[in-house]
Amino acid sequence: MQVELNNATGLLAVIGDPVAHSRSPLLHNAMLARLGLNYIYLPVHVLRGRTAPWLDAAREAGFQGFNATMPHKTALVPLMDELSEDAARCGAVNTVRLREGRWQGFNTDGIGFLRAMEDAEIPVRGRKIAVLGAGGAVQSVALKLASAGAAEITVLARTVEKAEALVKMEPGIIRARPFSGAELNRAAADCDLLVNGTPLGMAGVSGNFEDFSFLDALPPGAAVCDLIYSPLKTKLLQNAENMGHRAVNGLGMLIHQAICALELFTDENIERGPMAAMLRKTLTEPISRD
Ligand code: NAP
């Protein structure tokens, strides 16, 4: 990708520990090139525990904004001058911008998920949703689903206290269940959409679901979404598809959280459909070395 730099080039980044795996530089630089915006977006390895010194360094170096991945998302919360409602609700920040000297923190994961569901034409309003896992991604997704009008969200978690923390935020809508075979079957039997928010099935992570028999319990029209995007088709999605269910991977969420973040950094109003299509191609087609 050709990037032209000059003295007016704006600085954006993603911070993480590790950060080398992040797809954000690829996504954001592709969007910036497409929009003809004079910024560069860099990966910056900020060590765990060094979030506060990074903020000082970023301010001094002239960064206008940055995204954050593990383990900085929660550490950023008390360091922000202002927090968006989504970031405050889920207690995690994935997008930060500096405006008039003030750090503003946002969380675009939940809206990214909703927009991915919209693209896939999977309705959430009034629907029953089973969510597996209760980690950082699920905190954003489940709370956003609740504010988008989901009728009932069952969060099945190995550490059930994490799901119970979500119940406290949305007691009428979210309920917590242990992550067990029997509970998986029960939740699957009574949902319109099943979302995997655990790393089970992710490339480079050992472990997968012990069995996929809970998919047998899904009603015929139910859809399955995996937040994982590598591999593009997890065994969960493959099995769901073989059984005739709609199966959606995490690429849409990844793409839409990035589009939303770039809008916050640049104040551009991005036409989402064509941009998402371009990013999907960028992420899934082999890179040309020409
Ligand atoms: P996280 O904070 O580490 O949470 C992982 C969750 O999965 C926790 O609830 C954890 O339970 C549970 N879990 C892990 N191993 C399990 C097992 N063997 N059995 C049952 N539950 C298990 O991770 P995260 O950031 O939320 O990410 C979760 C997944 O979402 C990852 O695959 C990640 O790649 C994906 N993700 C995708 C996007 C996107 O844009 N598409 C964005 C963010 C994340 P404990 O609490 O008991 O450990």
Image (cartoon, rainbow, N blue to C red):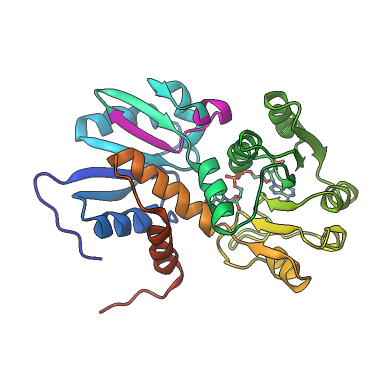
Residue 10 in the image, given as x and y percentages of width and height: 20, 43
Q: How many circles with numbers are drawn on the protein?
A: 0
Q: Position of residue 21 (x, y in %)?
A: 45, 56
Q: Tell me if 237 is positioned left or right of 189 in this view.
A: left
Q: What is the quadrant of residue 201 in the picture?
A: bottom right
Q: Is residue 54 left or right of residue 183?
A: left
**Where is residue 64 drawn, in percent x and y?**
26, 36
Q: Judge from the rendering whether residue 62 lies leftward or rightward of residue 75; answer left or right.
A: left
Q: Residue furthest left?
A: 7
- In this rendering, is residue 170 above or below 134? above
What residue is shown at x 59% (from left), y 39% (from top)? 136
- Of the 4 image quadrants, the one containing the N terminus is bottom left
Specify whether residue 186 is in view: yes
Q: Is residue 140 above or below residue 4?
A: above
Looking at the rendering, the stretch of residues picked out in magenta corresponds to: 86-98
Residue lying furthest bottom in this view? 290
| Residue at the (61%, 38%) spot, across then down | 148
Measuring from the top left, give residue 227's x and y in whole percent: 60, 53
On the rendered image, what quadrant is the C terminus found in? bottom left
**Residue at 51 percent of width and 47 percent of height:** 112
> Would residue 108 appear left or right of 181 to someone viewing this image?
left
- Furthest toward the right, the residue is 182
- Residue 216 colored magenta? no
The part of the image, by quadrant, that contains residue 234 is bottom right
Is residue 97 in the magenta section? yes
